[in-house]
Amino acid sequence: MADIDNANGRNNKPQSQIYALRQQIDDINMQLLKLLNQRAEIAAEIGRIKSGMATSQYDPEREGDMLEVLQQANQGPFSNETIGALFKEIFSATLAMNSEKARSALLVERSDEHQRTVITLPDGTKIGDGSFQIISGPCAVESFEQLDEVAAALAKNGMSIMRGMAYKPRTSPYHFQGLGEEGLKIGRRVANKHGLMMVSEILDMSQIPLMSQYVDLFWVGARNMQNSFLLRALGNVRQPVILKRSFGATIEELLYAAEYIVSSGNPNVILMERGIRTFENWTRNTLDISAVPLLKQETHLPVIVDISHSAGRRDIANTLAKVAKASGADGLMVEVHPNPAVAMSDAKQQLSIPEFEDMLAEIDMLPQV
């Protein structure tokens, strides 16, 4: 009997030791949890201060200094590599927390599911009210006759907004750059003649005084989506602003770009999804249709889809137009030219007038989401 009791004692002792050690680990876990949350609160306060200073939340130099101090103080048993990996996770989680808090405070963020910005143009056209608006016109203003022919077709088919691009930012400096102010004058004359609203792309904040005389809406192209000086300046104009997503920008970056305009005083911003650059080469860009419901979920601003620059080809325009409407977008943008074969820019993606009318007939059969 004594031998059995001794054996049981020997078996129970390791179990008791394990239990005691686990209790210590549980206590340390609770201490770590408390310290992590204290650290997060202090980091959040730093984030709030930085937000007021308009500086970046992420400070890689500070992160590197902290890691160096921690690794120098490390006495094991974890290796410096492991310590670095653990604290980088903490840093990353803290940055994500601060970013989420900063984003939730954005003026462009939706505060409730019913909040929406409805933009009313001078002629009464509304964007963002549940209707499906179409912005159309040639890639660039080439002549009065060219734009007049397109505008007549737009008006005949009940369109309200015409694109009339006078300045064309091109990849090559040797390609057609637009007619400049003469193009704006033509666009305004044609728009007035046919009772249309005109939108044109602005390239630089210095163009605002000139263009304000001619346009009903400003257009910020993909190349200028993150031009903060231009965006802030457009916060001071009376016209609505169409903001195109850059082909290399995330959805979050697009929202922050819109915030520059809205926080500077102009609440009338329309977001445009125009496709992102991927490895695919059968289209000019890859239309990120998932961006539409995501943007509609996250922001109260209207969202439209550019089916011309996303695909870069006219043969799938009708399908993309139907997809855009089915996604819940507030409208779309499509390029239309009297004779696409001789267009001075983007000939492959522009629709002829008959093709444009066919597209309208197809999307009219779809209900608005």
Image (cartoon, grey):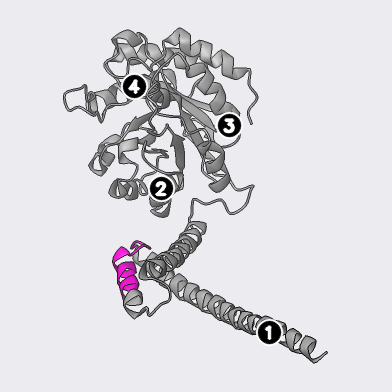
User: Mark 2 or mark 3, which has the lower sequence index?
Assistant: 2
Residue labelled with disc 3: 327
**In front of the other: 11 or 65:** 11
Amino acid type, callout 2: Glu
Amino acid type, callout 3: Ser
Residue at the right extreme, as displayed: 1
**Residues at marks 2 and 4 touching, judged by CB atoms closer than 8 Å:** no
Q: CA distance from mark 1 to mark 4?
A: 79 Å
User: Mark 3 or mark 4, which has the lower sequence index?
Assistant: 4
Does 7 appear above or below 163?
below
Q: Specify whether residue 86 is painted magenta.
A: no
Name the residue at 38% across, 80% down.
Answer: 75
Q: CA distance from mark 1 to mark 3?
A: 62 Å
Q: Nearer the viewer, mark 3 or mark 4?
A: 3
Magenta region? 55-68
Residue labelled with disc 2: 253
Residue labelled with disc 4: 139
Q: CA distance from mark 3 to mark 4?
A: 25 Å
User: Mark 1 or mark 3, which has the lower sequence index?
Assistant: 1
Q: Quadrant of the C terminus?
A: top right
Task: Name the spot of residue 4 as percent of width and height, x first.
Answer: 79, 86
Amino acid type, callout 1: Ser
Classify mark 2: residues with Cα within 10 Å, few (<14), some (14-19) or many (20+). Answer: some
Secondary structure beneath label 4: loop
Q: Quadrant of residue 95?
A: bottom left
Does 325 appear above or below 313?
below
Q: CA distance from mark 1 to mark 2?
A: 55 Å
Task: Name the spot of residue 200 as percent of width and height, x first.
Answer: 34, 30
Name the residue at 32% across, 12% down.
Answer: 146
Task: Name the spot of residue 325 as percent of width and height, x first.
Answer: 57, 27
Classify mark 4: residues with Cα within 10 Å, few (<14), some (14-19) or many (20+). Answer: many
Amino acid type, callout 4: Cys
